[in-house]
Image: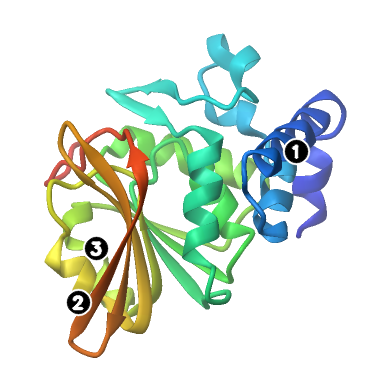
Amino acid sequence: MNARLISSIGGKSSRSGELLAQKLKAEGIVNTQVLQAIARSPRHIFVPEILAHKAYDNTALPIGQGQTISQPYIVAKMSELLIADGIPDSILEIGTGSGYQTSILAQLTEKVFSVERIKSLQWQAKRKLRSIDLHNIAMKHGDGWQGWSSKGPFQAIIVTAAAVSVPQALLEQLTDGGRLVIPVGGQTQILKIITRAGNEYIEKQIEAVKFVPLVPGDLL
């Protein structure tokens, strides 16, 4: 963990992150590395300034462009599921959004590859992640449904928006034994883990969730 990220959230915000991690532990998050990443991350910089007073509440918040920063419990839960079989060398994230989930992932692996379809959100997230000295992140403006094949295959893929069906391109970009954590559905959404076993994919349902839709294509 780099020193600047720790020091950048000193004082009140640092204490707020620690309290948030304690709340998530009480709600069932058990992975120590994930809880430490939550405690150290300055969630307030990833939300609009007008909502900064709610940054450490366990709730989703709007960030503009019809998008949200996910509820911290969901961020922690998906991160925990993603690394349950061990720490991957790299992680593909579909949907950079605010950059908060990205900041958690960057503390858990050597390299994060993150794809965002909305250019303005991508640039905001890049600026914020650099401000807290996280540089092990590569970003791409593009269609999340297509993944990032030139950087794959990946041991771990996380999708931060709900797909109506599981994108075939993402399944194909998993290594053998790799896992995909993804919310699937329309009005009713289920968080799933999909593990690749050769040419087969083993699916496990986790819990009901609510995400913005994973929209194909990209926007400037």
Residue 201 is situated, as x and y percent measured from the top left of the image, at: 22, 76
Instruction: Judge whether 34 appears above or below 179 on screen.
Output: above
Q: Residues within 10 Å of mark 1 (few under 14, many from 20)?
A: some
Q: Residues within 10 Å of mark 3 (few under 14, many from 20)?
A: many
Q: Which residue is mark 1?
A: 22
Judge by depth and name the residue closer to the eye, 71 or 6: 71
Residue drawn at x 55%, y 58% as measured from the top left = 80
**Does dot 3 land on a helix, a strand or a loop?**
loop
Query: Reading the chain from its start, which is encountered first: label 2 or label 1?
Result: 1
Relative placement, left or right, of 79 versus 206 is right
Q: Which residue is mark 2?
A: 172
Residue 141 is situated, as x and y percent measured from the top left of the image, at: 28, 50
User: Of the residues tagged 3 and 2, which is closer to the observer?
Assistant: 2
Residue drawn at x 22%, y 67% as measured from the top left = 170
Look at the image and tell me in which quarter the C terminus lies: top left
Q: How is the image coloured?
A: rainbow
Q: Amino acid at mark 3?
A: Gly
Q: Are marks 3 and 2 in contact (CB under 8 Å)?
A: no
Residue 208 is situated, as x and y percent measured from the top left of the image, at: 33, 40
Residue drawn at x 60%, y 16% as measured from the top left = 54
Residue drawn at x 26%, y 37% as measured from the top left = 118
Whole-angstrom CA distance, mark 3 to mark 2, is 10 Å
**Does dot 1 land on a helix, a strand or a loop?**
helix
Q: Are marks 2 and 1 in contact (CB under 8 Å)?
A: no
Q: Which residue is mark 3?
A: 147
Instruction: Judge whether 197 appears above or below 152 on screen.
Output: below
User: Of the residues tagged 3 and 1, which is closer to the observer?
Assistant: 1
Whole-angstrom CA distance, mark 2 to mark 1, is 37 Å
Q: Amino acid at mark 2?
A: Glu
Judge by depth and name the residue closer to the eye, 67 or 178: 178
Relative placement, left or right, of 174 versus 40 is left
Q: Amino acid at mark 1?
A: Gln
